[in-house]
Image: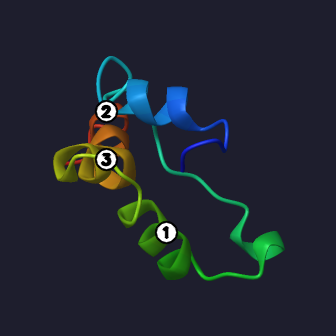
Amino acid sequence: MKGTGWEPFLHYGNSVLQEKILFGSTWLFMGMSIKQLTDEVMKLPLKEEEKEKWLYHNAAKLFDIK
């Protein structure tokens, strides 16, 4: 990911923004399934607990889903 411009997002996504990021996609327009897109998120150089927050826990907290 070095040199892509995403470094600040990943840095802060692993720290101060970890509970502020929600996964969303335009999967219909990207030619990839939601599973493929979430697999891409799982490949990011993030802590495992941050990936889980981005993909589920932050949205569950926002929408009060237990």
Q: Where is residue 15 shown, x and y percent of the image? A: 29, 23
21 to the left or right of 32: left
- Of callouts 2 and 1, which one flags the residue occurring earlier in the amino acid sequence? 2
Describe the element under mark 1 as helix, strand or loop.
helix
Q: Amino acid at mark 3?
A: Leu
Residue drawn at x 66%, y 44% is 4
Describe the element under mark 3 as helix, strand or loop.
loop
Establish if 33 lies above or below 22.
below
State the residue position of label 3.
Answer: 46
Q: Residues within 10 Å of mark 1 (few under 14, many from 20)?
A: few
Marks 2/1: CA distance?
16 Å
Q: Amino acid at mark 1?
A: Glu
State the residue position of label 1.
Answer: 40
Residue drawn at x 83%, y 71% is 29
Which dot marks residue 14?
2
- Mark 3–mark 2 CB contact (< 8 Å): yes
- Rendering quarter of residue 32: bottom right
